[in-house]
Image (cartoon, rainbow, N blue to C red):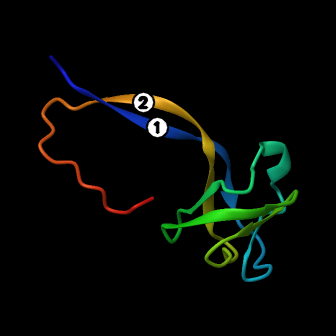
Amino acid sequence: MEKFLNVPVFKLLASGTTDDDGSPTDLIDSGADFVAAGVQVGDIVHNSTDNTYHTVTSVAADTLGVTGGGLETGKAYFIHSATISNSQLVSGSGVLLVEQATTS
């Protein structure tokens, strides 16, 4: 009998590229509307340019407060919900080793 792993896939709320440095703890994208996208405090920001992760600490229309320092101009980002996810079944058939590279 084939075995499956139930992997949560967190909902993508917004993505884009930062266009202003702002303060050291901000992510600014003047083309975004984070409130309308449903971004909330506690959601996860992935800075895909530098492969770093941040947590949302405050939400305004085009500005997010984030942990761990802001995202400078020209950084690509993805924002995922920390609470809304879908389950994805992944076949474990033929898998010998699963290794987690990071804790996020």
Is residue 33 among what the camera can see?
no
User: With respect to residue 1, does 101 lie above or below?
Assistant: below
Please, what is the three-letter code of the amino acid marked with disc 1?
A: Pro
Which residue is identified by label 2?
88
Q: Name, please, the residue furthest toward the bottom.
A: 24
Q: Name, please, the residue furthest toward the top.
A: 1
Category of crowding for the residue at label 1, using alpha-carbon neighbours closer than 10 angstroms: few (below 14), some (14–19), many (at least 20): few
Taking 40 as reference, is 75 left or right? Answer: left
Q: Name, please, the residue furthest toward the right.
A: 61
User: With respect to residue 12, does 47 lie above or below?
Assistant: below
Q: Residue at x 67, y 56 (%)?
A: 42
Please, what is the three-letter code of the amino acid marked with disc 2?
A: Gln
User: With respect to residue 72, does 40 lie above or below?
Assistant: above
| x and y percentages locating residue 37 in the rendered image | 78, 44
| x and y percentages locating residue 86 in the rendered image | 53, 31
Q: Residue at x 86, y 60 (%)?
A: 60
Circle 1 — which element? strand
Whole-angstrom CA distance, mark 1 to mark 2, is: 6 Å
The residue closer to the viewer here, 60 or 19, is: 60
Number of numbered discs: 2
| x and y percentages locating residue 104 in the rendered image | 45, 58
Taking 61 as reference, is 81 left or right? Answer: left
The mark that comes first in sequence, 1 or 2, is 1
Which residue is identified by label 1?
8
Residue contact between numbered discs 1 and 2, judged by CB atoms under 8 Å: yes
The residue closer to the viewer here, 17 or 1, is: 1
| x and y percentages locating residue 102 in the rendered image | 37, 63
Q: Residue at x 40, y 36 (%)?
A: 7
Q: Quadrant of residue 5?
A: top left
Category of crowding for the residue at label 2, using alpha-carbon neighbours closer than 10 angstroms: few (below 14), some (14–19), many (at least 20): few
The residue closer to the viewer here, 19 or 90, is: 90
Q: Quadrant of residue 41?
A: bottom right
